[in-house]
Amino acid sequence: MSQTPPQVVQPDWRPAADWATLRLRAEWLTQVRAFFAARGVLEVETPALSAAALPDPHLHSFSVRYCGPGRPAGQTLYLHTSPEFAMKRLLAAGSGCIYQLARVFRDGEAGRRHNPEFSLLEWYRVGFDHHALMAEVAELVTMLLKGRLSLAIPEHWTYRDLFQHHLDLDPHQATVAQLHACAQRHGISIPPQMPADAVDPWLDLLLTHCIEPTLGQGRLTFLYDYPASQAALARLRPTLPPVGARFELYLHGVELANGFHELCDAVEQRRRFMAENMARQRLGRSVLPIDEHLLAALAAGLPECAGVALGFDRLLMLATGKTTIQEVMAFPIDRA
Amino acid sequence: MATYSTNEFKGGLKIMLDGDPYAIVDNEFVKPGKGQAFNRVKVRNLKTGRVIERTFKSGDTAEGADVVDVELQYLYNDGEYWHFMDQQSYEQLTADAAAVGEAAKWLKEEAICQVTLWNGIPLSVAAPTFVIMAIVETDPGVRGDTSGGGGKPATLETGAVVRVPLFVQNGEVIKVDTRTGEYVSRAKE
């Protein structure tokens, strides 16, 4: 009597990206290293595991458990969402300009442009402000895209000008009621449970639905001078109202990089972390351990610097004309 | 009924919005670098077929809709309602004109149809993809013309009108694709 073998669904073991894409990824790593070597920027590595986590209420760290020598009762560690804190400690310890190609981890983020694990190219330039760093970002990105995408010269918009241009409102003055009315005018279906007492989620709603898709069409678009409430690690510029020295880079409607003229004030940084943890509590999220190593490094003295994190996979996606980030990764989360 | 978080959203999931059942067509996760994440969702109203866009804060929930597809046998039309039967349980269900819609003209007694039920009540009816029907009225064709070029209207036993080749005659039985309303071939009864 013959027996039918049990039906096993074979998982797709092959890479999600094609070989041309994976070869380009490798070629870019070489180009990036040459770019920074020529500028005297040092490549560094920092741990993916940390005892502390970024308390940003909208970023979710994976937590893991370490049990072993030195930790008989076990210890919760967090996978970094970016290598920022450890790199700032190197800067405070006198590293000078540094860069890192890091795998980073963000829980809860998956979609056409998101994978929970992805590659960030992060670098810090001592003595740069965010404008000088935006120029260097444009140089690097233009170099990588050479022969693939031809771009017009980059454009720069302040957050305020961009909202005034597209939506005819001042993002630094607008009330929740005005932002709500604006979203309705533009045909956005208002999500249930939007807060009545915080403007930032409303600004995020308008930015993602009405503005982002139009940014970076045929050129790099830099958006800078964010509301202070949206720049927890950036220094404030003493304008009226004060704005955060933060920038974002967009190309073809895709957000590619986020940078700061970095905050060097340990007392102010602690205050902001505590405020973020309070915001987490209000949203029903866990309070996270604050990175005392970072605060001690800031207190010891972080050199004046600007830093940026560039989404390596997303840039690769645009360069190869792919429509999803999964197509430029060997094994995205569904095949991990 | 269960509630679903945005993390469970995917194409085909049935949810309730403003009291109507919808099916998710497309779900896109968007996030402005730092800040609030949203799910931009395209949903199809299962009553009207209209597709609209809705936005949720990521992590928010929506109530599930009790919508299932079942195979039912069409029995008869009483002038107002269409009557169907579940061939396993022999339970009978009635569908109104809104639910039957365009499928009405393809429904022949005893045909097996896919019926979408919402809370146990027919919401929409899909006719079988191919139906075999007799022609009850068509102009006499040109004898000897087998090219099929041109064609002529023919009225079928359910009242549906399709274009058939000139050589197809009154009383013949034909196969029709209900998705396009087009003649496929002659058929044997």
Image (cartoon, coloured by chain):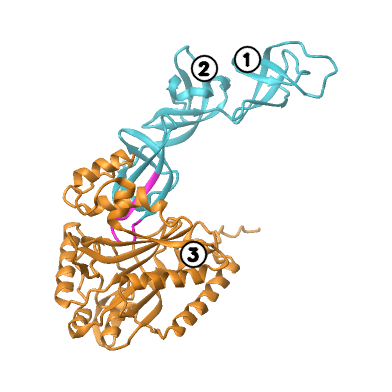
Dot 1: what SS?
loop
Residue B58 visible in image? no
Kind of residue sitting beneath label 1? Glu
In the rendered structure, which segment of residues is drawn in magenta? B31-41
Q: Chain of mark 2?
A: B
Left or right for A105, reference B189: left
Give chain A's shade.
orange
Q: Is residue B36 magenta?
A: yes
Of discs 1 and 2, which sits in the foreground?
A: 1
Letter of the chain in cyan: B
Of discs 2 and 3, which sits in the foreground?
A: 3
The image quarter containing residue B91 is top left
Kind of residue sitting beneath label 2? Tyr
- Tell me whether circle 1 and circle 2 mark residues in contact (CB < 8 Å): no
Marks 3 and 1, how far apart at CA? 53 Å
Q: Is residue A170 magenta?
A: no
- Give the labeled residue for mark 2: B76
The extreme right residue here reads: B144
Labelled disc at residue A335: 3
Position in image of residue B105 (x %, y %): 56, 19
- Give the labeled residue for mark 1: B157
